[in-house]
Image (cartoon, rainbow, N blue to C red):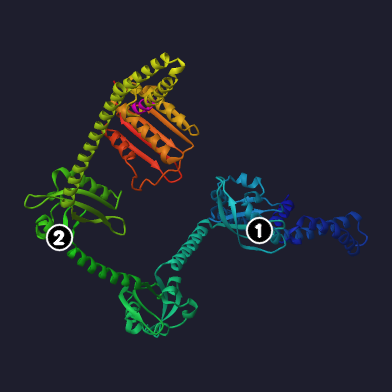
Amino acid sequence: MIESDWQVHSETYAVPRTHGVMFGPLLALSLIAMFPIFDYAASWLYPGRPHWLYDLIAATLSAMLALAIGYRGYRRFFAYQQLLEQHVTQRRIAENELETLFSLSLDMLTITGQEPQFSRVNPAFSETLGYDADELLARPYTDFVHPDDRPATLAAITRLNAGEPIIDFVNRYRRADGSYRWLQWRASHSKVPGLTCAVARDITEARMREQALAESEQRFRLLFENMSDGVAVYEATDDGRDFVFRDFNKAGERISRISKDELIGHRLTEIFPGVETFGLLDVMRAVWHDGEPRSHPARRYRDQRLELWVENFVFRLPSGELVAVYRDITERKAAEDLLRQSEARFRAVFEQAPIGIDLVSPDGLVIRANEALQQMLGYREDEMLGRSFRDWTHPDDLEGSQALAQRLREGGDDRLAIEKRYVRKDGGTIWANTQVAAVRDSAGVLDYFVAMVEDTSERHRAQQETRALLEQNRFLARRLLQVQEQERAWIARELHDEIGQSLTGIRADAQAILSRSRAPELVPIRESAQAIDEVANRLYSAAYALMHQLRPSLLDDLGLHAGLDQLLDHWRRQHPRTRCVFEFDDACEALPDDTELVLYRTVQEALTNISKHAAAASIRIDLRCLDPETTAPARIQLCVSDDGRGFDPDAPPRGMGLIGMRERVMSVGGEFDLHTARGKGTTICVSIPIAVD
C-alpha cells in the first residue's frame, strides 16, 4: 500500500524514486541472500555441530542484518515521505494559485486539445461572449469565429500545430446576442503533449477607439484638404525667428499659386519674401513664444510672384507647431470697392431721381425719403422719418397696401406694384403708381423695402376722361345698334306691308290679264303680262330675302332655334361645298328677345365673314346653356368655329363686323372672345348671362 501510494504520488508530482526507499523488497532480498552465507560460515566456524544450530545461527545473523538494513530503509522512507508531503503541499498550493488566477483573470484563458475545441475556459470567456462554459466546450471554436476571419484563423492554427507560437493574432468571435467582439490571441503548446494554452484579450473597445481615431484623422484630413481657406503648418527654426513648412492644403496651393511639393521643408521667408514687411512674421513669432492665438488683419501681400489681399489667424499646436489659417479676400475687396461705387451711384440716383423713392423698414417705418417724394407729399424728410407709410396712404387704399407689404414680407414675391392714392400734407390727394421691392440679406431675411412712387394724377385724370369717352362711345354704339335694329324692323315691315302687297297685287293683275288674253290676237298682251308676273315674282323674292336679312320673321314668331335653322339652311344652299354642323341645346329656348337677337346677329355676321374671308372647308356652331352650379350667374354660350385661313388678331380691323359683334354682346352684359391665327382657323365665343326662374 505504501509502495503503491508512493508510486502514485511520485509519478503525479514528479518526486525522484530511490532504491533505499523501497525497504520491503530489500529486506526480503537480504534475508534470502544472506541466509546461505551465514549458514555456511557457522558450519565453518563451528564444525561438528548439529545442522539446526547452523541454521539458527544463520537465521539469527540474517535477521540482524535484515533489521539493520530495514532500519536504514525506514529512515530513508520516512525522510522521503516527508519530502513527498512537502512536494504535494507545494504543488497543491501552486495549483490553487493557478486555479485562482485562471478564474480571476480578466483575460480569456483556455486550454485546447488535439481537436479544434475548447477543453477548458475561464469565466472571462463566458462574461465576454455571453455563453455558458458548457456551450463553449460543446462546439468547435471555429463556429464562433466571424466567417470573414475563419480562413486567417485556420491558417494560424496550422502554424501553431507546426510548432510556431501565435502572438497578437486578431479575429472576431460571435457573442450569444449575435454581435461580434474583437479578440487578440497569444497561444503556444504546453509541455504536456497534446495540450495548447491560449490567452485572448477583448480589444473591441480599443479597436473602436482606433477606428474612431482613424475616422477622426480622416475627417481632419478631408477637412484640411477641402477647406476653402488656406492652411499651412509650420515648424519653428532659428529659435522661432523663421518657420519651415511641414504641411499645406489644396486651398493654400490655389491661393498661393504654388504646389505643396515646392514648399515643404522650405523656409517661410524663402517662399514668401514679402512676409516680413507684410507683418505676418511678427505675429507668428509672438504666437510661437507665448502660445496665444492671434489674428493678422486683412492686408495686401505683394512680392515678385504674388499679389493679393489676405487675412490670417495663427495658433500653436500642443506639439509646438504653428498653424496659419488664411483667407484670400481679393475678390471681396474688389466687391467692396464696387459696392462703395454702387452706393455712391445709388445715393446720386436716390437724391436726383425725378420720381419719389423711400426706404421703409420691415415694420413699415420710413428710413429715408428723397427730395422728389418730399415735394410730392409736401413733407420734409425729418417729418417723414420714423413714421409709417400708412400715415399718408388714402384710407380706401390702406387695406391693399398692407396686403402688398405682407406678401413681400412672407417672401411670396420680391417685387409688387400698386396704384393707390396718397394724402398730401395740405390734405390734397394724388394718384401714384407705387412699385415696392423687398431687399433681403444673404440669408434671405427681409432687410428693408424700396418704394418708387410715380405721380400719375394727370395720367389718372386722362384715363378717367378716356374711360368716360369710351363709355360714351359704347353707349352711342349700342344706341346706334338699337336704332339700326329699329330701322331694319321698320324697313322689313315696309317691305312686307307696302312693297310686298303691291307686288302681290301686280302679280294678281298679271295673272288676270293672262287668263283673259287667250285669243291669238292678244298674244303680245299675254307676253307682256307674263313678263310683268315674272318681274314681280323676282322683286317679291328679292324683297323677301331682304326682309329676312333685315328681320327674320321666324325669329319673332318661332324663336331663336327656328330662326338659326332658317339662316343656316339658306347659307348651306349658297355654300354647298362647306360642311356646316349646328348643335343647339334645347334648354336655351325662351330667351329674352334682345339676347336672341344678339345671338342671331352674331351667327349671321360670323357666317358673312366666313363667306368673305375664311375659305373654310367646315364650320361648327354650338349653342348651349352653362350649368348654373358651375357658373354664376347662369349663362348661355355660343361658339362659331371654322377651319379657314384665320388672320392676325393684332392687325387693325378692316371692317366693322367684329366691332359690331363685340358691341352687341357687351350691350347685353356679355363677354366676347376671339381666338385665331394665320392658318389656324377662327373661333368666336360669346357668353351672355341669363336669368333663371
- Tell me the mark number nearer the camera, choosing from 1 and 2: 2
Residue 631 in view here: no
Which label sits on residue 305? none
Q: Residue furthest right?
A: 48
Q: Which residues are magenta?
A: 541-547
Q: Earlier in the sequence, mark 1 or mark 2?
A: 1
Dominant secondary structure (helix, strand or loop) of the stretch shown in magenta:
helix
Question: Is-magenta flag for residue 544?
Answer: yes
The residue furthest top is: 516
- Whether residue 535 is visible to the viewer of this picture, yes or no, is yes
Q: Residue at x 49, y 37 (%)?
A: 617
Residue hosting label 2 = 372
Splitting the image into 4 quarters, where does residue 338 fall? bottom left
* Residue 561, quarter of the rendered image: top left
**In the current view of this chain or complex, which residue is farthest to the front?**
521
**Is 53 left, or right, of 680 in this rendering?**
right
Mark 1 lies on residue: 152
Amino acid type of disc 2?
A: Ala
Residue at image point 28% right, 59% down: 441
Residue 470 or residue 183, whichever sits in front: 470
Q: Element at badge 1?
A: helix
